[in-house]
Image: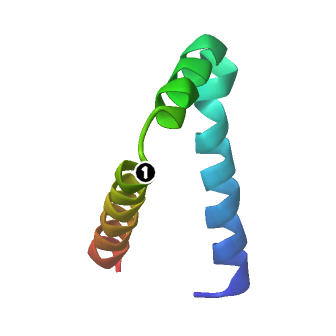
Amino acid sequence: MDSGTLWLALACMLVIEGLLPFFSPSGWRSMFEQILRMSNGQIRFFGLCSMAAGLVWILFLL
């Protein structure tokens, strides 16, 4: 993997991350209000699940 692929992946991530606030700002705000009510353990578990899903996806694509 070269550095161009990494930058392309990061750019794609930014586009995907921007879809919800662009198309549904009220839904995005509601989601963050729900996240603020979560405990640190719940947020860590969500982050762990996201990382695991990303790693599985990467391994599947390679």
Quarter the N terminus occupies:
bottom right
Residue 23: x %, y % from top left:
62, 17
Residue 48 found in image quarter: bottom left
Amino acid at pointer 1: Ile
* Front residue (pair 49, 7): 49
Q: Point out residue 57 in the picture as x, y percentages from the top left corner.
A: 32, 66
Where is residue 19 drawn, in percent x and y?
61, 31
Q: Nearer the viewer, residue 23 or 34?
A: 34
Q: Compared with residue 58, is residue 27 higher up or lower down, i.e. above or below? A: above
The residue under the point 33% across, 57% down is: 45
Which residue is labeled 1 in the image? 43
Coloring scheme of the render? rainbow
Question: Residue reaching furthest bottom?
Answer: 1
Give the residue drawn at x 66%, y 25%: 21
Dot 1: element: helix
Determine which quarter of the picture holds residue 39: top left
Residue found 31% across the figure and 78% down from its top: 59
Total labels drawn: 1
Q: Nearer the viewer, residue 43 or 49?
A: 43
Give the residue at x 60% y 15%. 24
**Image x and y of residue 51, in percent:** 40, 66
Please state, as top left, top right, bottom left or bottom right, where the C terminus lies in the image: bottom left
* Closest to the observer, 55 or 8: 55
In the rendered view, would you say 61 is above or below 15? below
| 48 with respect to 13 (left or right) | left
Rendered position, 37 above or below 5: above
Picture layout, residue 10 above or below residue 22? below
Q: Image check: 25 left or right of 49?
A: right
Position of 50 with respect to 9 (left or right) is: left
Q: Which quarter of the figure has residue 56?
A: bottom left
| CA neighbours of label 1 inside 10 A, class few (<14), some (14 to 19), many (20+) | some
